[in-house]
Amino acid sequence: MIQLDQAKVRHVSMKLKKPFQTVNGLVVTRDTLIVEVYDRDGRVGYGECVAFSDPFYSPETTTTAWDQLKNFLLPMLNKKKLKHPSEVDDIFSGVKGHQMAKASVETAIWDLYAKQQGQPLKEVLGGVRDEVESGVVLSLMDDIEEQVAEYNKKGYKRFKLKVQKGKERETIERVKNVVTDTPIMFDGNGMYGPEDMLHLTQLDDLDLLMIEQPFRTDDYYYHNQLKTQMKTPISLDESIESDHDAFQAIELEACDNINVKLGRVGGYQQALNIHGYAKVAGMPLWCGGMLETGIGRAHNVALASLEQFTLPGDLSESERYWEEDIIKQPFKVKKGCVKVPDKPGIGVTVNEKLLDKRTIRSFDHVF
């Protein structure tokens, strides 16, 4: 029995080392919610709500998540006798949407459970890797050549580019001039329409690792059509908000691989279900990033240790985004890989002093 005792939700604000620009928005300061769940013995599990302050990526924001956590999700766990964290997904199933808020609680409970078992979260989840391959994301504001050269020295296994419509080839070729053998992909961020089908197929000669989410979130049809016309693999990101979405995407042949983000799909149980479908279908997975702190990154690394996560994920090291992370052992990339923590739970120590300093508001909940 997990026996939850209390929880704390913190609204944390952290300034990025450099602004991060996509076609959908600019992030200068990363506001996030950190969820702490405690058991009766004082052990604590950590989760992170990866919603942004503004609804440019998804309908969820830090404000909507704060409300859901305080008024709905945490109270739903009151007097519940949890035997296993997989039960949380079913408890929250009565709430429509709000996947990121759900995931922040569910992942914290998985962390707590693993600590109670005295096992690394990787082992509890069934992970098979001691280290995971790391890719890096370059924003529209990055000095492409300079950044690529720097990250190439660290051995990153893949470069993901944010691009502007009509300037994809120019951006990709600038990167290819610096590195010749590191796989390159670009993120469409859903900015293309059916009228861009020919334009996208004309990029097939660039020998990309993949094109991520070219069309709208709800558009399985045009993703399928593009997939049949290109040899370049098509990846789905924002389209996959649940295990059912992943099942449909696989059955409708709308993609060649799936980017799994814990926050976007609602937590580990949904991610594990997606992993099961992908394994049966023989479909590669990879772990996406959401400008997380070290807490969220630790969860991502544990997820990426699962068998079907065979493509490099958005798992760059802590110093890529932060002058000082809120964990005491920042993640490092060595020879293009990140080590999976082997201590109980997510395996990192939170810098409580810095976390307090970055907290701008909080509330407590007693179960």
Image (cartoon, grey):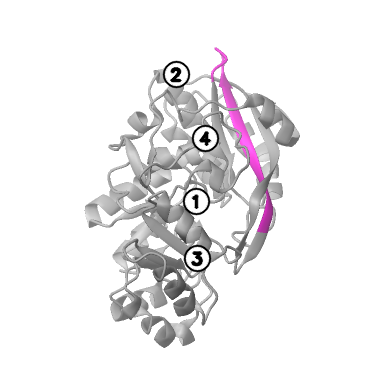
Name the amino acid type tagged 2.
Answer: Gln
Q: Secondary structure at mark 1?
A: loop
Check disc 3 and report the residue beneath it: 145
Query: Answer yes or no: do the residues labelled 3 and 1 have beta carbons within 8 Å?
Result: no
Q: Earlier in the sequence, mark 3 or mark 1?
A: 3
Amino acid on which the number 1 mark rests in the picture: Gly
Q: What is the CA distance from the residue labelled 1 to the residue labelled 4?
A: 16 Å
Q: Give the alpha-carbon distance from disc 1 to disc 2, as whole Å.
A: 27 Å
In the rendered view, tell whether residue 296 sits above or below residue 283: above
Residue position marked by numbered label 2 in the rendering: 116
> In the displayed image of the protein, which residue is found farthest to the top?
41
Q: Secondary structure at mark 4?
A: loop
Q: Name the residue beneath numbered marker 1.
A: 289
Report the disc number at residue 361: none
Q: Residues under labels 3 and 4: Cα distance?
A: 26 Å
The amino acid pointed to by label 3 is Glu
Q: Given the image, on which type of amino acid does mark 4 rest?
A: Pro
Q: Quadrant of the C terminus?
A: top right
- Residue under label 4, please give it: 330
Mark 3 / mark 4, whichever is N-terminal = 3
Label the magenta part by its dominant secondary structure.
strand
Report the mark closest to the observer, 2 or 3.
Answer: 3
Q: Which residues are magenta?
A: 27-43
Q: Is residue 219 above or below residue 155?
A: below
